[in-house]
Image (cartoon, grey):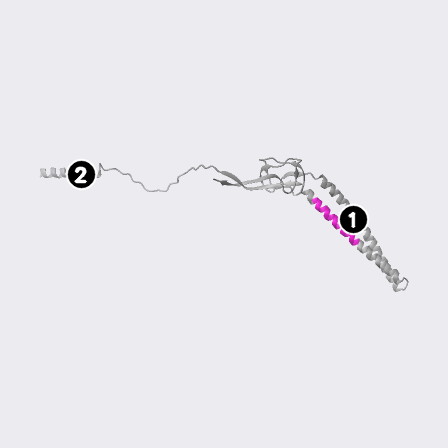
Amino acid sequence: SEMCIRDRRLYRELSVESMDAERGGPALLVETATVQPHAFETNLELLGELRPQAVVEVLSRISGRLREVLVDRGDPVKKDQLLAVVDDVDLLQQIHRAEASVSVATAAVSREEASFENLKIQVARYRKLYNEDLVSTQDLEDLVSRMRVSQAQLDLVRAQVRQAEASLSELKIQQSQTRIYSPLTGFVGGRHLEPGALVNPSVPIVSVLKLQRVKTLVP
């Protein structure tokens, strides 16, 4: 029986060795773990170009000579902030002349209104006299004709007042356009003209950039 036990041990040892030989060596120890989610950070560096959300070229709405530019490149600006001023000396002179024309035309209206009202009173009186056979038909017709001419003259001077007032209003609008304001809040991206330069509605004075949001362009 002792011999039989030894044979069994020998066989077991031989069997383990033969298995290791078949596997190519001793058995490996392997550690296992439970799979869990995990966040990984990745840094990517690229060359690109930042562009503003909007670029507005600020122009003058009238032609003239630039008197002032109140901002420079890189300056922050707010919406409706004054950026530049176009010389308005000539416009102010035209406004003074237009105001005088309105005054003259208004005075003419007052004069013609008084004349017309006077003729209306005379016509009414002559008609009563005519009904009493105290004036002739010719006298009444002459007076009525004069009243109609006065009415036409009154209409004319009233039209002249409206025309003069319209011209004055247009000049005042042009004078207000000599002051150039920022259309948005942002930064001055470029200053294209200097004081003394001639401006017109097709020549930009400054450019304003809207930088609240930017676009990234990667080639």
Does residue 139 appear left or right of residue 17 in this picture?
right
Does residue 210 appear left or right of residue 89 in this picture?
left
Rendered view: 105 above or below 193: below
Does residue 32 appear left or right of residue 143 in this picture?
left
Rendered view: 112 above or below 206: below
Q: State the SS at label 2.
A: helix
Q: State the SS at label 1.
A: helix
- Specify the quadrant that holds the N terminus: top left
Q: Do callouts 1 and 2 mark residues in contact (Cβ within 8 Å)?
A: no
Does residue 123 appear left or right of residue 80 in this picture?
right
Measured from the top left, where is residue 129 in percent x and y? 88, 62
Tell me which residue sits at (9%, 37%) in the image. 3
Mark 1 residue type: Ala
Magenta-colored stretch includes residue 156? yes
Instruction: Please report the bounds of the magenta region as a residue range.
Output: 154-172
Magenta-colored stretch includes residue 80? no
- In the picture of the structure, the residue carrying the numbered disc 2 is 18
Image disc number at residue 123: none
Please, which residue is most extreme toward the right here?
134
How busy is the neighbourhood of tag 2: few (under 14 within 10 Å), some, or many (20 plus)? few
Tell me which residue sits at (80%, 53%) in the image. 154
Measured from the top left, where is residue 212 in percent x and y? 54, 41
- In the picture of the structure, the residue carrying the numbered disc 1 is 105
- Magenta stretch secondary structure, dominant: helix
1 or 2: tag closer to the N-terminus: 2
